[in-house]
């Protein structure tokens, strides 16, 4: 009787999603079958650090947290300070009923540029001039180490915009006006994430362990082609132009296993990208077979209407139905969660759309090993601002440019 009771109890607590020996799809399915609606829409929510706390993470089942520009634990925070902050928030997620870890993201767009004493690399416009994809790949690898040193597993990089008008104030984020150069520079993705296995399925995200980070190709699509270079404006171009100029780097990114893709504030021929179901769901997820998750830009669903937030409920509906899986920047957190839950319960947004989003988010979290290693340690702390000059630095330090290169690579 005692043996039978022991077997029963052991079977009762076994959860397939917690077993790394189980196939990926089995783990995802098992976990989703256990999740309530509130837990699912929590996974679709990304909040800024100043909104997050262990209590908020636990109460609302939040799936992701980010540090925006200048959002640090405190001035001149060390790697250990960052790790302590991220782990503190993570412990709130792990204390929930199902213990789903959150994913922490940050803009490490030319090195870990938000962090004191991090190595700073040239912006994309400078790297594109090198015409050297292997250099960019090694910069990605160096950046991944420094991001992981601070306990963060996700970066909102690279920007693969094709800047077609120098009046665009963000041209420095673009590798080139030539889409072929931008395509080549997507080699930074395996630098950040690791090289996807040769037999990897097209579109499936890949992250090669604790020294790599999940990457984010942005901003889908056409952000560098707006009329007169006006930021967040309208890109007027026919479908062939869009596919031949602005889309190729996304195809390359997906082939290289990019984990996430961020949608652009801009419009295409008058249609807001954050509400463009044809391109997000139809083309990106359908035609290109992208299996990672699609994330919004900061409070971008608010801007689906003009003026922003003129009809917030409609904005939530339009963005989620278009195919957004994770919504970034919920300053009005409870309003967003309540609105999304209401629309699902009233069949305005089908449950199948929610399940698609959550499946994609969980896929990335499982692939990158977050369930097995949700808490960061200090084993990589010495990688932040390492004084050792890596080979990639030597490659650009010719006798004629050594002083400029050292300045570009210096720590703040």
Image: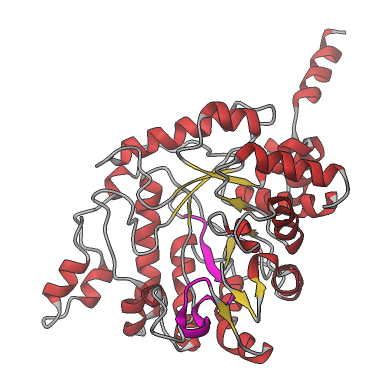
Q: Is residue 331 left or right of residue 345?
A: left
What percent of the width, then of the height, locates residue 239?
A: 68, 88
Residue range in magenta is 213-232
Q: Nearer the viewer, residue 203 or 63?
A: 63
Residue at x 72%, y 37% (from the top left corner): 39
Residue at x 59%, y 64% (from the top left corner): 261
Residue at x 12%, y 83% (from the top left corner): 400
* Above or below: residue 279 compared with residue 92: below
What percent of the width, then of the height, locates residue 104?
A: 50, 45
Q: Is residue 218 magenta?
A: yes
* Above or below: residue 222 compared with residue 336: below
Residue at x 15%, y 79% (from the top left corner): 401
Q: Nearer the viewer, residue 249 or 170?
A: 170
* Above or below: residue 93 compared with residue 109: above
Number of on-image labels: 0
In the picture, which quadrant includes the N terminus?
Answer: top right
What percent of the width, then of the height, locates residue 361?
A: 66, 51
Please name the colour scheme applied to the rendered image: secondary structure
- The answer to whether residue 295 is seen in the rendering is no
- The answer to whether residue 340 is seen in the rendering is yes
In the picture, which quadrant includes the C terminus?
Answer: bottom left
Residue lying furthest top: 1
Q: Nearer the viewer, residue 264 or 373?
A: 264
Q: Is residue 274 magenta?
A: no
């Amino acid at each position: 009787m005692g043996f039978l009771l022991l077997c029963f109890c052991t079977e009762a607590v076994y959860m397939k999603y917690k077993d790394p020996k189980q196939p990926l799809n089995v783990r995802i399915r098992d976990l989703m079958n256990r999740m309530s609606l509130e837990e699912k829409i929590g996974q679709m929510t990304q909040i800024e650090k100043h909104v997050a706390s262990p209590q908020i993470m636990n109460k609302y089942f939040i799936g992701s947290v980010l540090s925006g520009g200048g959002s640090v634990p405190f001035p001149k925070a060390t790697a250990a300070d960052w790790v302590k902050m991220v782990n503190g928030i993570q412990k709130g997620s792990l204390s929930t009923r199902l213990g789903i870890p959150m994913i922490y993201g940050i803009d490490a767009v030319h090195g870990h540029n938000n962090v004191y004493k991090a190595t700073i690399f040239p912006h994309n416009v400078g790297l594109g001039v090198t015409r050297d994809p292997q250099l960019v790949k090694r910069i990605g690898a160096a950046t991944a180490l420094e991001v992981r040193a601070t306990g963060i597993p996700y970066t909102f990089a690279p920007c693969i915009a094709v800047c077609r008008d120098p009046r665009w104030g963000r041209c420095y984020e673009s590798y080139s006006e030539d889409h072929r150069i931008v395509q080549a520079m997507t080699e930074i993705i395996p630098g950040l994430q690791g090289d996807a296995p040769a037999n990897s399925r097209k579109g499936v995200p890949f992250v090669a362990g604790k020294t790599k980070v999940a990457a984010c190709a942005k901003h889908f699509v056409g952000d560098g082609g707006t009329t007169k270079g006006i930021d967040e404006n309208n890109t007027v171009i026919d479908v062939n132009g869009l596919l031949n100029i602005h889309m190729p780097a996304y195809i390359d990114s997906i082939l290289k296993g990019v984990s996430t893709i961020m949608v652009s504030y801009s419009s295409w021929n008058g249609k807001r990208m954050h509400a463009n179901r044809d391109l997000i769901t139809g083309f990106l997820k359908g035609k290109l077979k992208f299996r990672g998750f699609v994330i919004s830009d900061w409070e971008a669903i608010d801007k689906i209407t003009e003026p922003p937030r003129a009809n917030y409920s409609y904005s939530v509906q339009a963005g989620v139905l278009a195919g957004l899986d994770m919504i970034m920047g919920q300053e009005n957190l409870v309003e967003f969660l309540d609105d999304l839950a209401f629309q699902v319960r009233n069949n305005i947004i089908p449950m199948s759309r929610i399940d698609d989003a959550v499946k994609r988010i969980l896929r990335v979290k499982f692939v990158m090993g977050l369930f097995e290693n949700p808490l960061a340690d200090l084993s990589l702390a010495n990688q932040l601002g390492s004084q050792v000059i890596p080979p990639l630095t030597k490659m650009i330090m010719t006798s004629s440019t050594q002083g400029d290169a050292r300045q570009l690579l210096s720590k703040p």
